[in-house]
Image (cartoon, grey):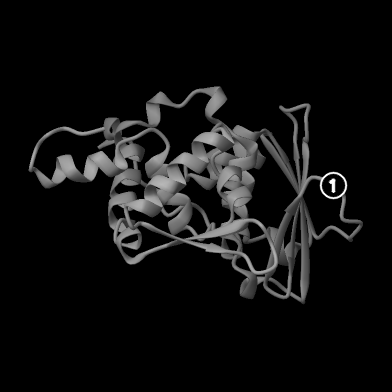
């Protein structure tokens, strides 16, 4: 895609303006390096299109592609030019919270993306002991309604199969309720009082959830209609 303009905005858009590209940059900046991890954060993208976009970003110098030792697959690392897009990504997210929040629909509440974001939001040093197991039960989905988040020695893992470990905290809600809490549109206390969520577990963890499970960096930004 070429615009035939010397304007730097036009030249930047030639690289970043194609569908999915800016979200791939988001995932790279957030720390995803493997193909499967990138696809997990972009659940609707096809493997073929993701491969095409990764190759394009590599050619443009935003990605360093490295073969994984002893394997046929690759890892993808954000270069300095890619990392410099962080303020752009943040500003875009802030704009979206103010001006595009009203465009959300039920199909936008992706449980896989939510769990990926919750995994990234855990603050391991604020947890008690060497291992913490959190179980999530979503009442509005039939396929994979149960998820586990296991934090052990600063290693985090998300799974849909019971890891066979004692659970420290149970969350029961819809995907939308938990997503709205993470985005700052609701609180755990309010959701419980309204019967939208049930939380059971160790009071040392349930009394102050946001101390070890941070909300989105965009939480608290009001929509434009409230400003």
Query: Quadrant location of the C terminus?
Result: top left
Mark 1 sits on what residue?
A: 161
Q: Secondary structure at mark 1?
A: loop
Q: Is residue 169 above or below residue 4?
A: below
Q: Position of residue 223 (x, y in %)?
A: 33, 36
User: For mark 1, does the 10 Å Cα neighbourhood hold few (<14), some (14 to 19), or many (20 or more) residues?
Assistant: few
Q: Is residue 114 above or below residue 105?
A: below
State the residue at coordinates (67%, 73%). 154
**Camera-side residue: 67 or 82?**
67
Which of the 4 quarters of the picture holds residue 29? bottom left
Asked if residue 144 lies left or right of residue 166, the reply is left
Q: Is residue 55 above or below residue 82?
A: above
Query: Quadrant location of the N terminus?
Result: top left
State the residue at coordinates (56%, 40%). 179
Asked if residue 134 lies left or right of residue 215, the reply is right
Whether residue 12 can be seen here: yes
Q: Is residue 134 above or below residue 138?
A: below
Farthest left residue in view = 6
Whether residue 218 can be seen here: no
Q: Position of residue 87 (x, y in %)?
A: 29, 57
């Amino acid at each position: 895609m070429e615009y035939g303009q010397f304007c730097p905005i036009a030249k930047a858009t030639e690289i970043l303006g194609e569908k999915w590209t800016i979200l791939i940059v988001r995932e790279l900046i957030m720390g995803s390096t493997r193909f499967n991890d990138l696809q997990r954060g972009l659940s609707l993208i096809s493997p073929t299109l993701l491969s095409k976009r990764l190759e394009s970003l590599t050619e443009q110098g935003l990605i360093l592609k490295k073969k994984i030792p002893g394997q046929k697959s690759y890892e993808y690392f954000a270069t300095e030019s890619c990392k410099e897009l962080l303020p752009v990504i943040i500003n875009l997210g802030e704009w979206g919270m103010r001006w595009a929040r009203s465009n959300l629909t039920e199909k936008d509440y992706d449980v896989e993306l939510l769990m990926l974001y919750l995994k990234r939001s855990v603050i391991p040093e604020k947890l008690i002991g060497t291992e913490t197991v959190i179980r999530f039960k979503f009442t509005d989905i039939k396929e994979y309604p149960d998820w586990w988040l296991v934090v052990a020695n600063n290693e985090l893992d998300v799974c849909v199969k019971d890891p066979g470990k004692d659970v420290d905290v149970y969350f029961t809600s819809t995907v939308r309720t938990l997503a709205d809490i993470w985005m700052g549109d609701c609180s755990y206390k309010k959701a419980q009082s309204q019967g939208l969520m049930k939380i059971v577990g160790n009071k040392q963890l349930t009394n102050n959830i946001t101390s070890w499970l941070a909300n989105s960096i965009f939480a608290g930004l009001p929509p434009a209609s409230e400003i």
